[in-house]
Image (cartoon, rainbow, N blue to C red):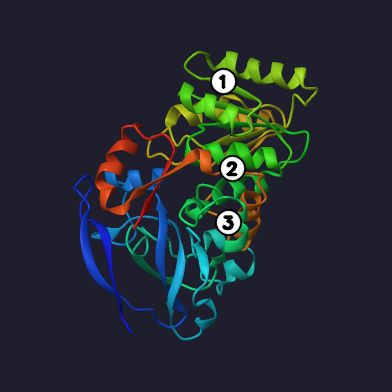
Amino acid sequence: MPIDAHRWLMTAPGAPLQRQDFAAIPGPGEVVVAVAGCGVCHTDLGYFYDGVRTNQPLPLALGHEISGHVVAAGEGAAAWMGRAVIVPAVLPCGECDLCRRGLATICRAQKMPGNDIQGGFGSHIVVPARGLCPVDEARLAAAGLTLPQVSIVADALTTPYQAVRRAGVAPGDVAVVVGVGGVGGYCVQVARAFGAEVVAIDVDARKLDAIVADGGAALGLNAREHDAKALKKAVADFAKQRGLRATEWKIFECSGSAAGQTTAFNLLVHGATLSVVGFTMDKVEVRLSNLMAFDARALGNWGCPPEFYPAALDLVLDGKVLLAPFVETHPLAEINAVFHAVHQREITRRAVMVP
């Protein structure tokens, strides 16, 4: 039976999002999720303000950080009925050669809500059941969290989780996170949970203060107050004072800005790993030969395979990664005002839209 639903559509870059009613109907292997919360991501703002093209033509509902309850199921998906879930930000097909070889993040048939299919800024969303992450609501309540709050696990947490995991972060490592907004702030926490001593770099003193006070960063450095050489020396001094290695730093570029990418590249040391997590349309000029000279490596990071979502969620439910201090909820009907406030940096915590 169709479910009466609504969503907020982007019709053109910069144009106010428009509410549209629709009937939510699951096909075979699909479910309808009643949205509990959907986070506002830097990627959404890129589509809306910067003209980054979505794969599905407009009009399109944005939003890919989604949690909720399954309220309808198509053929083959009945086992999900009534369950609390997080919808992965990238849904691989699970059947192609790439998926079978453990390369789901580059699956050519993957579906991203708010890019390839209708997204989560609405009352309901229709998504494939494959890869959904179940949420134990008893553990959620015991952790003092709500289902809307954990929507941001899909991307804001799992993307840096995948980056930290792939970089091989381990106890005794120096991890440097450039840009400690939504994704970067959680990258700090995940790297710390993996055992690293973490240095946070940003241009926003408020974000640095917050991530040092509540997010597990051992040192915060304001890039406005240090040139490239001074930043690198400050990290090296920190490592020396803590008895940590001067080599093999794990560097995570999470700002999604040209300046941040340049800063991250300039931090390369021997054996370093540079993980590019943030996205920008801007170009940067770097000397790639530094990778050769330092015997370093650079990794791109696109999403996180669904099979790693439960482990990332466990970090939250076990109290190793904090969500509540860095998340705030807003009524979905205020989405246009919230987009503007996030874009203007009037909201610095992760905004979650609640229908």
Answer yes or no: is residue 287 visible.
no
Q: Where is residue 76 in the image (x, y as percent from the top left)?
A: 51, 85
The mark closer to the camera, 3 or 1, is 3
Q: The disc labelled 2 sits on which kind of residue?
A: Leu
Q: Mark 3 points at which residue?
A: 141
Q: The disc labelled 1 sits on which kind of residue?
A: Leu
Q: Which residue is drawn at 52% across and 43% down?
A: 324
Answer yes or no: is residue 104 visible.
yes
Q: Residue at x 36, y 65 (%)?
A: 117
Closest to the observer, 331 or 192: 331
Q: Is mark 2 on a helix, strand or loop?
A: loop
Q: Position of residue 235 (x, y in %)?
A: 66, 21
* Alpha carbon separation for disc pair 3 and 2: 14 Å
Q: Is mark 3 on a helix, strand or loop?
A: helix
Q: Which residue is drawn at 32% across and 48% down?
A: 47
Eyeballing the image, is 291 above or below 65? Answer: above
Q: Residues within 10 Å of mark 1 (few under 14, many from 20)?
A: many
The mark closer to the camera, 2 or 1, is 2
Q: Mark 1 points at which residue?
A: 221
Q: Mark 2 points at which residue?
A: 322
